[in-house]
Every structure is written in structure tokens, then in C-alpha cells.
Amino acid sequence: MSAQLPACQLLERYYGQAAQLWPVAPPEDAWLLSHSTAMVSDSLALRQQWQANERLALSPFSPVEAPPTDQVVLFWPKTHQLGMWWLSWLCHVLPANTPIDIVGEHQGGVKRVPKVLSGLGMVCDKLDNARRCSLFATRTVEMESPDSAWETFDALDMRLVSHPGVFGHGKVDEGTQLLLQALEETLPKKTLKVLDMGCGDGIISAWLAKRGHMVTAVDVSAFAAEACRRTLHENELEGTVLQSDVYSALEGERFDVIISNPPFHQERDISYGPSTRLIEGASSHLKAKGRLIIVANAFLPYTELFERSFGHFETLVDNRRFRVYLGSVNTH
Ligand SMILES: C[S@@+](CC[C@H](N)C(=O)[O-])C[C@H]1O[C@@H](n2cnc3c(N)ncnc32)[C@H](O)[C@@H]1O
């Protein structure tokens, strides 16, 4: 089997078929999986994929019990601040002088890595360059805990806590704002059991909890789940926050309403996988007369999925760029 993604193809060409890697923040690639012993990722879905193949898979919030014996490879993310965070995390959790290679696509900003490393007082050697990707080598240095990357900002009368790589870092998304306006008019003024699917920094969860609803928030990303927890705490609000690949952590749970500004990107590509699972699985996670309310870019093809799953749907708001859709159980 050969690597599919350009950055993994560069690794395959450089390390060869004998490669034994310890990828950090990796993408999904079967060659990479078969050439790694362990990995670290904020994504629960990816960690579950590695675990299903009997690999050790760590979250950045779990302790690294034994230093890696295989080559650590950091996949440089397109969010520069997140790359900086992973670097300082690696320096913090691994012994000083541990070799780390860094790979990434040129259009994802990897060419900035030598400057970043020099700014942090870390060595940098260029190892290879192909498929519009580069591979650099460095070594860890002693560094303070990366906890300082958490940031707070105020929006909609709430204090939001965010982290590099979490959706909406430092601003309120236009779609989310439209969704909240629609919810203000649509939700009854009584306590509901609500699921916020893909909670990001927790803006929707905090907004709902502030209005007295019992909130469960889920996100596939450990950074997002932790951001949401911190947002609820910062606003003295209650809620259950779980890492979950769509409904994977919600076996047997049913809600009055499921609310989402669902994801439609994976890395740089459009991916309808999670939003399709969200809409198709909604009826099995809603009580009788339960409702699914989502906001989506107007060009996204969700209406057919609503038709198929609920038999009908309503468009609550349409501002040409975004639409808010509602599907109800048992009302047709
Ligand atoms: C468009 S953002 C919305 C964030 C936040 N609710 C807001 O409105 O600002 C979509 C969120 O879905 C999360 N997500 C992506 N794939 C997911 C999956 N498979 N399961 C659960 N959440 C997922 C992303 O991490 C991201 O936080």
C-alpha cells in the first residue's frame, strides 16, 4: 500500500517502507497508519481508527507515559498558532533533545517552520522537499507548558474561551449568529434537553444553558471539548461536555432538540460525512416530537437528507448565504 496524501508520500519517499513513525496531529492515511506504532491527535475519530488497528493513540490532554522510541513526526497544521502549540507541547512533554521531524504542505504554511524554529531557539535541518511539501528536522528544547494558548473573548454577553484550531477562534461565525436568532424565536420558553453537536468553543451551549436548557455538548476535537468546558465554567453555567464522533458517545441518549452548525470540512476538502451522520441519525437520538435545527451555507445539499430522514423540513431563516433548517420527528 502506498501513501495517498502528499505529505505522507513525502514521508514514504524519505523514510522508505521500513519507516516506524510516531505521528503527531496526523491526517487520515492508511500508509501512515501501517507505518506508525503510536500517535497523538486531538481528533477522537482518528484516535479510534488507530486504536482499532491496535496502535496506541493519545490525546494531547493525556499524559505521555513513555517517551517515543520511533521517529516523532509533527504534521504542521494550516493554523499557524496550532503548529506553535504542538511544538511547545512536544517540547514540554518529551525529554530535551528528542528528535522531531516536521512535515507539511507548502500551501499549509510549512515554509514558515525554519523561521518559527529559529525564533524558539531550536535547530532546523531541511531533509526533503517533494509533492509541494517539505520535511524538516529539529530537536526539542526545554519549554514552558503550552497552557497559555487559551484565550478569552467576549461575545453576545458571554465570555468565550478558545484555543488555536478550534472553530471560530476569537470571533462569532455568521451562520452561528443566524442560528441563535432563529432559536430565540423558535424554542419554547421551558427547560429542554438539548444536544449541541460540534460545539466548538461552546458558544451555542453557553447560549442555551444561559436560557435554562439542560445542555449536552459534543465535539470530535479534544481542544473544542475542553474549550466548551472552559466557556461554560467561565460563565458559571452547567452542561455535560463529551468528546464524540457525531453520536458515538451518546448511545441510548434522546433529546428534545438537537442543534448544530455542522462541519463540512475535513482538512481542506469538503466532507459531508459528519453532517450526513448527524441528519440521518437524528431521529434515533430525538424523543417523540423532537426537533433537529441546523444552520448551513445555502449551497450545501442538506434538504434531500432532511426529506429522507424526516419526510419533510422547514426553512426557518434564509439570508441567502446561510439557511436554518428544522426537521421534526413524528409530525408528518
Ligand atoms: C462549524 S463548527 C461549529 C462550532 C460551534 N458550534 C459554533 O457554532 O461556532 C463545527 C464543529 O464540528 C466539529 N466536528 C467536526 N467533525 C465532527 C464529528 N465527526 N463529530 C463531532 N463534531 C465534529 C468541529 O470540531 C467543529 O468544532
Image (spheres, grey):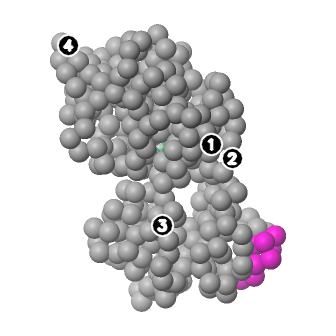
Asked whether 153 falls inside the magenta stretch, the response is no
Label 1 sits on a secondary structure element that is strand
Q: Residues within 10 Å of mark 3 (few under 14, many from 20)?
A: few
Q: Residue 151's mark? A: 2
Asked whether the beta carbons under mark 2 and mark 1 sit within 8 Å of each other, the answer is yes
User: Residue 62 shows which numbered tag?
Assistant: 3
The residue range painted magenta reads 117-129
The amino acid pointed to by label 1 is Val
Kindly indicate whether the residue at mark 3 contacts the one at mark 2 (C-beta within 8 angstroms). Answer: no
The reply to whether residue 319 is in sight is yes
Residue 332: name its quadrant: top left
Task: From the viewer's perspective, tell me whether residue 68 is left or right of residue 285.
Answer: right
Image location (x, y in percent) of residue 12 = 47, 79
Could you give the CA–CA distance between mark 1 and mark 3, rounded to whole angstroms? 20 Å
Which residue is rendered at x = 35% and y = 49% of the image?
Answer: 245
Label 2 CB, ligand 1: below 8 Å? no
Give the amino acid at mark 2: Glu
Within 10 angstroms of label 2, few (less than 14), some, or many (20 or more) residues? Answer: some
